[in-house]
Image (cartoon, rainbow, N blue to C red):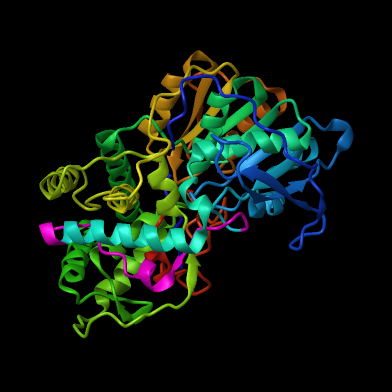
Amino acid sequence: MLAAVLAILTLLIPAAPARATRPARAPLAWAPCPQDATVQCATLRVPIDWSDPYSARIGLAVARRPAADPAARIGALIVNPGGPGGSGVDFAVDSAGFFTTAIRQRFDIVGFDPRGVSRSSPVQCTAALVAAAPSPLITTPRAYADQIAYNRRLAADCAAGTGPVFGHLDTASAARDTDALRAALGEQTISFYGASYGSLLGAQYADLFPDRVRAVVLDSVMDHSAGLDAFLGPETAAAQDSFDQFALWCDREKLCAVHGRDVRNIWARLLARARTGTLRDPYDVGSAVTPVDLLKVAFTSFYQPQWYSLGYYLKEADAEPDQSDGKAAYAPAGLIANPFPAVFCSDWSLPVTGFADYRARLDALRRIAPQMLASPLALNGTADCLGWPAPPANPQRDLRPARTPILLLNARHDPATAYAWAQHVRAQLGPKAVLVTYDGWGHVVYNRTSCTTGVADAYLISGVAPAPGTHCAAKLPDPFGVGGGVGGIGVAVGVAKHAPVGQRALARPGYR
């Protein structure tokens, strides 16, 4: 089974120079982390509202894996796995399985749970309300009005379950938190690695505090300058491109469970059944699969990618007989973590003027993506923010030219952060930024091949970016691989013989 992540992957930074971050009131008190005693954990106190640094404070959970070779130590490498909603603490604790020995020897790998996430005043919402989210494939004026009403109910519910930090969850505030962490670590400058939505945090930190960065790696790049059209269009084109790559693989490889059959015809048949409510998940036949569910099954399989698993899912879903007894009732109880809309809608202004505008945009996206219809991430991001009760604190703008060399990494066939975004961000950052292209597939590319790992490691260690125009050759994904990666990216698809894309793949994706 696949765990959707996402996002998917972003803020207004004031044009004026950032004022100095108020230091933490007390040094970090390190203690062994409960998950791994070789990693140190602490709590960083920061203001809820950075416009008033002396306002009430919250605690941010921090973890540090000390450099394995203190004599060769370069400094702190702050890491973020994206989301929005990924845990930097978990990333630091698990970093031994992600970063190479060379990086672990020379850097303290430091992660923190951003405000609103995991151990840092998490966004908490009523589980049953989250589960009742309407479909973003809005087809009637009534459904459009229902989406707006739902978003307002959800925002009020989450604010009540979260507390005063709920109105201060934008990534610009997280960038200021990052500088407070730098100060608390006693570092004059930091290095930074951010994946997916974490690339937004890294880009904004470097933009706000250009004199406090030594090296920044933006892996699978968010373009926070994108308006509504530049958000929806490239994201949807990227999702369709990933479907096309899967279809080409199925046409070519007998390993594909639907090899020799027309993948697009199978897909069209499944979508038609999903629209009528008669399509069942072949790995949980009590559950109906909606059109959005089906899109997410494919979309999340493109992260690793897990083409072999998706082929089996299509084969077995196509063989499952129609049923029309409705979706099995599911009524989750209590509160659950749900940071995505609260953070995302603080970072993005995606104005839609009404149902007619929304419907016209969906129609345009279907012309771009006849199979995927729209990027599930772009669709959810836009629908989630309709009628959101507060304007974004950190809406889009261009980045200023970088003062320090910055490395961007992106797959040419990334389903979640479009390659066109990486190209545009590189242009914004100017001549000091270098985009290294992985000519392959999937989302997050640091440890895809020895080339992608090598160029990132060499840059982090030396501070010298690779030559402009550097490419890393594609490597066909392991068809039986069960994932791995950052913050849940490409989480194992299961232990069954065919590694099925099961019900967990139907969760809402994020950029991470």
Nearest the camera: 267 or 163? 163
Is residue 255 in view?
no
User: Which residue is pictured at 17% across the width and 44% down the height?
Assistant: 361
Give the quarter of the image for residue 269.
Answer: bottom left
Side (left or right) of 330 relative to 204: left
Span of residues in magenta: 119-142
User: Which residue is pictured at 37% across the width and 66% down the height?
Assistant: 506
Compared to 170, does 436 lie above or below?
above
Side (left or right) of 391 relative to 336: left
Examine the structure image and report whether residue 281 is included in the region drawn in magenta. Answer: no
Side (left or right) of 155 relative to 143: right
Nearest the camera: 287 or 10? 10
**Image spot of residue 287 (x, y percent):** 32, 79
Which residue extends farthest top? 431
Which residue extends farthest bottom? 325
Compared to 413, does 302 lie above or below?
below
Exactly how many numbered labels are in the figure? 0
Examine the structure image and report whether residue 128 is included in the region drawn in magenta. Answer: yes
**Image spot of residue 133 (x, y percent):** 31, 65
Side (left or right) of 20 relative to 320: right
Is residue 40 in view?
yes
Compared to 400, does 39 lie above or below?
below
**Image spot of residue 394 (x, y percent):** 43, 36
User: Which residue is pictured at 45% across the width and 23% down the height?
Assistant: 399
**Image spot of residue 243 (x, y percent):** 30, 50
Which residue extends farthest right? 71
Compared to 310, does 414 lie above or below?
above
